[in-house]
Structure formats: C-alpha cells, structure tokens
Image (spheres, rainbow, N blue to C red):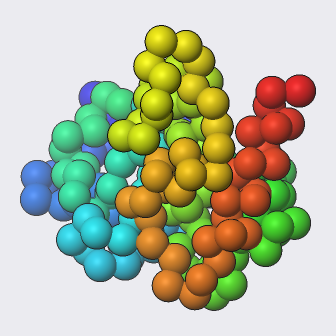
C-alpha cells in the first residue's frame, strides 16, 4: 500500500512510530503543515485525510496507509484555492503560522456544512445547517490563532461559503 499525499503515492515509513506530521515535514519536506503544540491542542498541523480534518501530530503515518492526505500545498497546487484567496482578501492571517491548519480545517468545515453535519451549537437538527459567524467560530475552535486574526478568518470563511451557495 501507499499513502497518497497531494496526489502522489508515497511509501509509508518503515518505523511505525513516525507521526504523519513528521512524515510530511521531515521526510517529504512539505513544510506548509506547521508544528504547533505537538499535542493536538492548537490545530496548526491540521491536514485533510480523505477530505476530513485530522491533527497530523496525533496521527501515525502507518494509520493512513492506503488513504489520501491533502496538505496546504495540495490545496493550492495549481493556483490558490478560494479559501487561500479569501484569507488574503479578509486579512485572515497575521503572522501566518496557523494559516495552513486554519485553511485545511475551513476546507473540511465547509464540506461538513454542505453535507448537513451539525455542530455542538446547531439549533435545528431537522433541516440544512445554516452557516453563521457563531457556527464558524464553533467549528473552527480547534484551531487557535494567537495573533488575533479571528475576525478576518471568520470573514474569509463566510465569503467562500457565500460563493459556494451562489
């Protein structure tokens, strides 16, 4: 088997103790995924695993054998993704350290919304999920920005959600 990373098959590491984060950064030199707390608390290392967000620091590379991983490099491979553009346009980044994880998490979050997956604060579970700023904040709460770009991040996500709905 192989791990499909940004569309390219990669052999899983021989050492079963290697985290997905270490595989991406240290062995494949995909440094867009950041090392934050390395304990699953900050979300800086968020990547997409078969389209769902995961913390790569808490995921062993051996666990994703045969699956597809998308990093920030994969989201913007040919051109900036709509979320990357929106983060720039809405000042959704300051130091930028958390930005790759934020964008990966937001990408998965928008897909969750479209699939009708409720969050902890979703009030009406009988119909489609209505995206609000509170809903975005709740769904992005696993990704911390220490610079205070929260409003710009929410603005960027809301803008892309509006584009998708149009």
Percent across and percent down for residue 57 are 27, 63
Residue drawn at x 36%, y 40% as measured from the top left: 120
Q: Quadrant of residue 24?
A: bottom left
Q: Quadrant of residue 156?
A: bottom right
60 vs 111, nearest the viewer: 111
Count of all numbered marks drawn on residues in the image: 0
135 vs 12, nearest the viewer: 135
Q: Quadrant of residue 99?
A: bottom right
Residue drawn at x 19%, y 44% as measured from the top left: 62
Percent across and percent down for residue 91 are 79, 74
Residue drawn at x 27%, y 35% as measured from the top left: 65
Residue 71 visible, this angle = no
Residue 162 visible, this angle = yes
128 vs 77, nearest the viewer: 128
Percent across and percent down for residue 18 are 18, 61
Q: Quadrant of the N terminus?
A: top left
The answer to whether 98 is drawn above or below residue 1 in the figure is below
The answer to whether 154 is drawn above or below residue 68 in the figure is below
78 vs 138, nearest the viewer: 138
Q: Quadrant of the C terminus?
A: top right
Residue drawn at x 26%, y 65% as measured from the top left: 40
Name, please, the residue furthest toward the top: 126
Asked if residue 124 lies left or right of residue 35, the reply is right
Percent across and percent down for residue 161 are 74, 39
């Amino acid at each position: 088997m192989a791990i499909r990373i940004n569309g390219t098959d990669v052999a899983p590491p021989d050492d079963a103790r290697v985290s997905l984060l270490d595989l991406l950064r240290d062995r494949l030199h995909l440094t867009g995924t950041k090392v934050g707390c390395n304990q699953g608390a900050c979300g800086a290392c968020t990547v997409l695993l078969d389209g769902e967000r995961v913390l790569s620091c808490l995921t062993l590379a051996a666990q994703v054998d045969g699956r597809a991983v998308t990093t920030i490099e994969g989201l913007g491979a040919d051109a900036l993704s709509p979320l990357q553009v929106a983060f720039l346009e809405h000042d959704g980044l300051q130091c930028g350290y958390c930005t790759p994880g934020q964008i990966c998490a937001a990408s998965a979050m928008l897909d969750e919304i479209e699939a009708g997956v409720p969050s902890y604060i979703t009030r009406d579970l009988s119909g489609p999920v209505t995206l609000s700023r509170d809903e975005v904040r709740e769904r992005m709460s696993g990704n911390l920005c220490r610079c205070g770009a929260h409003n710009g991040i929410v603005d960027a996500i809301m803008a892309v959600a509006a584009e998708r709905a149009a």
